[in-house]
Amino acid sequence: MVRRMGKYKPPAERRHGKGVQECRRCGSRDSVIQKYGIYLCRQCFREVAYPMGFKRLR
């Protein structure tokens, strides 16, 4: 087995985009709600939205 990894640099740290924000509860990076500084994924947001003061208008 040939070792070539020494000549490659590690990938650059992301500063923008979907891969930067993560959910505060579960750590997921998929569909994170950033509005109002919430930073929760949509699944976690549905679980804690009512205790946070959000109400459904139906």
Image: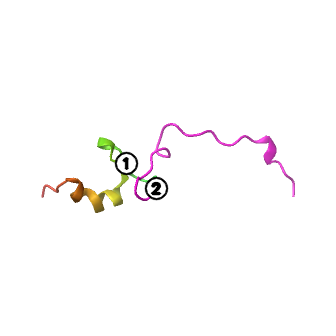
The amino acid at mark 1 is Tyr
Which numbered tag is attached to residue 58?
none
Q: Which image quarter: residue 13?
A: top right
Depth check: give the residue in front, 25 or 30: 25
Percent position of residue 8, x then y: 76, 42
Residue at the location (39% across, 52% down)?
A: 31
- The residue furthest bottom is 47
Which numbered tag is attached to residue 27?
2
Residue at the location (29% across, 62% down)?
A: 47
Q: Is residue 3 above or below residue 46?
A: above
Report the span colored magenta: 1-26
Q: Which residue is mark 1?
A: 39
SS under mark 2: loop
**Quarter of the figure that contains the C terminus:** bottom left
**Magenta segment: does it hold 21?**
yes
Q: What secondary structure characterizes most of the magenta part?
A: loop
Q: Which image quarter: residue 46?
A: bottom left
Percent position of residue 23, x then y: 41, 53
Percent position of residue 43, x then y: 35, 60
Mark 1 packing: few (<14 Cα in 10 Å), some, or many (20+)?
many
The amino acid at mark 2 is Gly
Which is nearer the N-term, disc 2 or disc 1? 2
Residue at the location (82% across, 48% down)?
A: 4
Whole-number angstrom distance, CA of label 2 to CA of label 1: 10 Å
**Magenta segment: does it hold 30?**
no
Percent position of residue 10, x then y: 69, 43
